[in-house]
Image: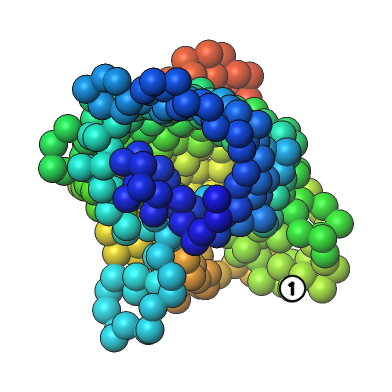
Amino acid sequence: MSGDDLADLFYLTGLALPNTPKYRLAATMKVRGTQFRVQDLKGNLGSSDLQGQVEVQTAGERPKLTAKLWSATLNMADLAPTLGTSAPKPPAEATDAAPDNDRVLPDADLQVNRVRGMDADVTYKAGSVTAPRIPMKAVAFHLVLADGVLTISHLSFVLDQGQFAGNVKIDARTDTPVSNIDMRINDVDLSQFKSAAMKQAPLQGTLLGRLQIHGKGSSIHKFAADSDGAMTVVIPHGQMSDVIVELTGINVLKVLGLLLANGQGQTEIRCGIVDFKDRQGLLGSTTVFLDTSDVLITGRGKINLDSERIDLSLQGDPKKLRFLRLRSPIALGGTLDHPTVGIDAKKLAVQAGVAAALGALLTPVAAAIAFIDPGLAKNKQCADVMSQADAGLQN
């Protein structure tokens, strides 16, 4: 078999197969009554190889596909059609929303009638992964489709150090699917994220996190625009580049020196937390802070998952006297696909002092930590920061 998209085989088989890049597959098929066995499946979807065993039983109320599949190498770009990424379109007129071809969140609709027309039980694993700028080494999941409800469990994206794992459920029994996503970031080492030109990563330490959202929508974009939930990440301890710390300070003379010197100095991260609550597709910050040995960095703002517009700002409260300091926050804007970073001269940062700034964050910090893992509250660095904030003190 060969063609442009496996999903086109629906018209021949009645099976709701996923959208794929161009494919070429070969196998041995054995038919016994209403049972079709596809053995020794081998071939390629795009630049990814695919192997495995497939069985289709057509005797029931709906055909059922059972498969065990694996790839020696998966190219993550080959998953784009499956996730609903469309081909580029001509530029749209200026608008607050991102043009369709610039969207990060795909807007291709799930064909619910096809999903309701079959059942499935599929396991998949990729032994190695090709992904731009992400040190990923394995992907795995178990997909079950029964009576219009699709569940993806044991979904994991394994990095060189750490993983992103969890579960997804899509209920397509109604015209507008209802989805739930619960994913966790487990022990991801930040030092693995750096470009070839960098001598060392801008951030070092362990990243923990959780994403839990619920919503309605026939596409990833429509679901995100309707969603409610929360997204939280924590760095219990680590280090970061002096340039980043000083830019939020901002000590103009020192930043200039660090940039000229390539900024190889490191500052200790005592505890960092980013916590967003999602309400009808609007991610609003409840807690954004990074407590370092030199500066307490705090932030606020929102991300609109419908328009994909970013409106965030970061402010640094130095723990030591700065010779020359600009009291303007760092502004993060643009869209998810084309973010921008700059100094917002229109907004004068109000410096409330380190103890006051941290103390105001105490309650949401405790809630954010518990959302990821109640045991994090006992982490020495974050526990010390919270106790100091509670006492109104800061080293």
* Position of residue 165 in the picture relative to residue 240 (left or right): left
Provide the residue designation for mark 1.
256
Q: Is residue 32 visible?
A: yes
The residue sitting at 49% across, 53% down in the picture is: 20
Where is residue 50 shown, x and y percent of the image?
63, 41
Q: Is residue 135 left or right of residue 349?
A: right
Say left or right for 194 vs 56. right
Give whichever of 220, 34 is nearer the camera.
34
Residue beneath the point at 74% across and 73% down:
256
Give the camera-side residue of 367 and 57.
57
Whole-percent x and y of residue 3? 51, 59
Q: How is the image coloured?
A: rainbow
| Snapshot quadrant of residue 349 | bottom left
The image shows residue 199, relative to residue 360, as above or below, that is below
Can you give x and y, in whole percent of width and height, for residue 128 in the image? 73, 39
Between 91 and 395, the one lying in front of the other is 91
Q: Position of residue 394 (x, y in %)?
A: 57, 34
Quadrant of res 245: bottom right
* Mark 1 residue type: Leu
Residue displayed at 46% across by 31% down: 183
Residue at (62%, 63%) from the top-left corner?
247
Q: Quadrant of residue 35?
A: top left
**Disc 1 element:** helix
> Does 145 sit above or below residue 225?
above
**Quarter the C terminus occupies:** top right
